Image (cartoon, helix red, strand yellow):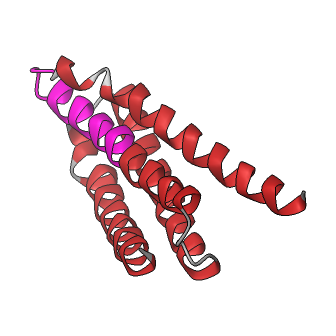
Amino acid sequence: MVLLAQCIGALFGLTAIVFGAFGAHALKKIMSPEQLASFETGVKYQMYHALVLLMLSFNMNLDTSLERYMVYCFVLGTFLFSFSIYGLCISGAKGKKWTFLGPLTPLGGLFLVVGWGLLFYSFIQNLL
């Protein structure tokens, strides 16, 4: 599980840099300021959670079910949240907004909140 979290964290970090550069240069010409701001939010959240996955994988064994669920929540949440935003923004800029992606964004956000909640619970559990 540690290696998986490290690989996905590195992949999320790599693609966040690529998508950020793509948004700042190529998409700037076709997106509205609101769409570009949403796209940048997706990139930021992707990078934040890439770093979280790397920190967790280097500081925890990720061998308990709590730790595994935490990683699953961060991975799935980041994918659903950020990539649905990318799809919505790019498709909207091309005039054919993929509305089916709309419900995935808050679902991804919910998984991220649960991941952070599990992390908080793991800290509290260690205090008690």
Query: Which residue sits at x=56%, y=47%?
Result: 115
Magenta span of residues = 79-97
Q: Residue 1 or 102: which is nearer the viewer?
A: 1
Q: Is residue 96 left or right of residue 106?
A: left
Residue 10 part of the magenta segment: no
Number of numbered tags placed on the structure image: 0
Toward the right, the furthest residue is 128
Q: Give the image location of residue 18, x and y in percent.
A: 29, 64
The image shows residue 104, relative to residue 112, as above or below, that is above
Q: Residue 50 or 128: which is nearer the viewer?
A: 128
Rendered image quadrant of residue 97 = top left
Residue 81 part of the magenta segment: yes
Query: Which residue sits at x=15%, y=30%?
Result: 91
Q: Give the image location of residue 42, x and y in percent.
A: 41, 44
User: Which quadrant of the figure contains the C terminus?
Assistant: bottom right
The image shows residue 21, relative to residue 7, as above or below, that is above
User: Which quadrant of the figure contains the N terminus?
Assistant: bottom left
Query: Which residue sits at x=32%, y=60%?
Result: 21
Query: Which residue sits at x=89%, y=60%?
Result: 127
Q: Give the image location of residue 99, x and y in percent.
A: 20, 18
Q: Is residue 125 left or right of residue 109?
A: right
Q: Residue 23 or 61: which is nearer the viewer?
A: 61
Main SS, magenta residues:
helix
Q: Is residue 119 left or right of residue 17?
A: right
Q: Is residue 68 left or right of residue 86?
A: right
Q: Residue 80 or 118: which is nearer the viewer?
A: 118
Q: Give the image location of residue 36, x and y in percent.
A: 36, 37
